[in-house]
Amino acid sequence: METKARNSIKRGVAIALTVTSVVLVLMMIFGVMMLLNQGNIIKIPPQLFYQVMTIHGTGMIGIASLGGSAIMWYFLSKYIHLNPKIFFTNLILTLIGVVMILTGIFVFKFSDGWTFLYPLPSASAKIYGSTGALLFLFGLLILGIGYLIMYFYIAARLIKEYGGLGKSLGWDYIFRGKKGYGPPSAVVASTMVIIANSVGILAGATALVESILNILNPNLTFDPMMAKHLTYAFGHIFANCTIYMAVIAVYEILSEYTGRPWKSNKAFLIAWNFSTLFTLMIYTHHLLMDFAVPEWMLIIGQIFSYANGLPVMVVTAYGALMIVFRSAVKWDFASSMMYLAMFGWVAGAVPAIIDATIVVNHVMHNTKWVPGHFHTYMGMGVIAMIFGFMYYFNKTEGTQKQNSVDKLAIAVYFLFFSGIAGSFLYAGKISVPRRWAEHLPEWTASDQVGAVCGILVIVSAVIFTIRYIMGLRTVGKKDQEQSLKSAS
Amino acid sequence: MYQSIAWYTSVFFIFLIGLAFSFVYGESRKLREYGPIQEKGYKIRKFYFLALVAIMGFGSAVSLSRLPYHEQHAKAQSNVKVVDVKGYQFAWDLSDENFTVGEPVAFRVTSKDVTHGFGLYDPNLKLIAQTQAMPEYTNVVSVTFDKPGTYKIMCLEYCSTGHHVMIKDIVVKPKGGK
């Protein structure tokens, strides 16, 4: 019975990772298409550009979340019993949502971006018709419902196993002086994610419902500033939680490869509690250029965005360095990707923190500096963790082994992803606005560099994906071999 | 100025982080007991934590004294030219388009339809100030032009398929010039 449940979990994780890897490559191709157009190398109509931009943003964040969920589900199921049906429910609702979003964008020309600002969808609906906007908005809503079902289920399981979410976040050790180590890092991180992301998704759902109601009945209007708060509370938290789910793989894999435990001591637990709090409160750094927002709220946005860097820099990244230091770690695809991904995450945090400085934001907000920093910690952080986990999954559950092409692909991926991130950040330095279909001649050089780097990143991603899908055939064979050996 | 500070600060800190990761990678093939490494590591971490807090504290103290929000709540001053700006898909309306070097200007920015971003670019295409143009809200951003030439107002918040054509040129005359 237990083996059957475990096999179901593995099957769910394998399907989620397959969808993730294929969609990732597709979204990367869309990303390069945009850079080629901005760099004047190809010519696509602005309408199509913005459709591609909308699917690139929605698809990337959605797929980072799906891949992160697979990591969280896989490792969490080692510590608490999880019902595989819940994961499949989320997966099916995600796929239904994705089909609706794709139809809305490519059939009905919805092109308002993934973090659209109210009342843009209803304004666009008046021009292009309401079907596309409604398909997109309801698609996102269904996707959110899938995640809420999964999070509420995990919350219920954690409460049953640990006696409350406070306890699975280590409050007994922080506030009540309990000795020893707290719950496993996967449990602590999952608790943080379900608390923060449930709040974020509920905020996003409210913003979605506002836009839907406004489209269906234009006389029903809402406060655009409140809607923007809700949109960015969702967007910021949801994007951040993809990292907090994926980093579970770093804790588990580096610990296993070095043979050193990554236990949740008091500093670790305090860091994750602060991450929970800060992730919920710092979304206001997306509204620093809304001068009508109370000044104290914007100052909080800056100060706590700085502070939010501390848990990752002082505890998680530092912990990764410490656990690897003189450990005789075996470097292979999985461990290399986890280690490099930690670098990518911290490196991306630097320009992100700088952008949260109000005086800097005044001349860099909504320039390409913004995609510059989030491409660094998403592409070289979260996505690298997901790719690394794919290899780890096939190796642990199957018999996949690393070859020289893998090594080369890792080097190419990180080298040229640095090129993409660098070209974006440089474009931000020279004030190139983000989300522009066409660029002035003064700006195109950085786009061209980014596009060339992007093509090579796609080559690596295709190699990772093919190797993962081929490696899936070996999953389960290890168990068969072991049972054959024990039988003989 | 802030763009260059952001760029060089990022490059510097990312380089330092890269050095730390490279050093640890270089040492990763050796094998030592973890206990003493943890003990020493935790000691170093205290100083590392304090150094980061000090850097962030310094950055906050310096930067928070120069916020661009002053004009939002300040009473109108007689020497400041007030210009009403309205954004709409896909153009900008200004109540006054005559600007002179050295003259303080307060742009009162709003929108007639969806949210736009009021981005002011100097003649070298460098972004010098911005604020959001949101329907039902007015954001006031103040600028004193320091050189003559053709400045551009560009939309910095995605506002639909004509977002990239939402550009308006404004000419700033030299002091005392025509």
Image (cartoon, coloured by chain):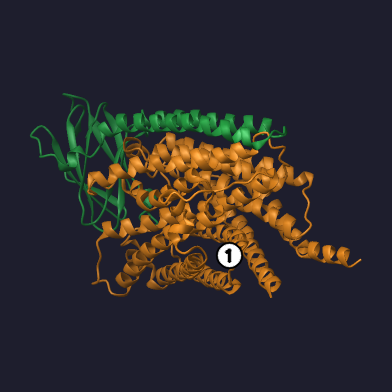
Chain colours: A orange, B green
Tell me if residue A154 comes above or below residue A302 in the rendering.
below
Determine the residue located farthest toward the top in the rendered image.
B176
Q: Which residue is depicted at the point 53% across and 48% down?
A: A180
Instruction: Give residue B122's quadrant in the image.
Output: top left
Which residue is the site of mark 1?
A80
Tell which subunit mark 1 falls on. A
Tell me if residue A294 comes above or below residue A120 in the rendering.
above
Q: Of helix, strand and loop, which one carries label 1?
A: loop
Instruction: Give residue B89's quadrant in the image.
Output: bottom left
Tell me if residue A143 comes above or below residue B50 in the rendering.
below
Front residue of A337 and A362: A337
* Residue A448 percent across, percent down from the top left: 55, 40
Mark 1: amino acid: Ile
Mark 1 nearby-residue class (10 Å; few <14, some 14–19, many ≥20): some
Quarter of the C terminus of chain A within the rendering: bottom right
Q: Which residue is depicted at the point 51% across and 60% down?
A: A62
Q: In the picture provided, is B94 more to the left or to the right than B122? A: left
Front residue of A221 and A267: A267
Residue A47 shows up from this direction: no
* Residue A191 percent across, percent down from the top left: 48, 58
Tell me if residue A224 comes above or below residue A418 in the rendering.
below
Instruction: Give residue A439's quadrant in the image.
Output: top left
* Residue A324 percent across, percent down from the top left: 64, 38
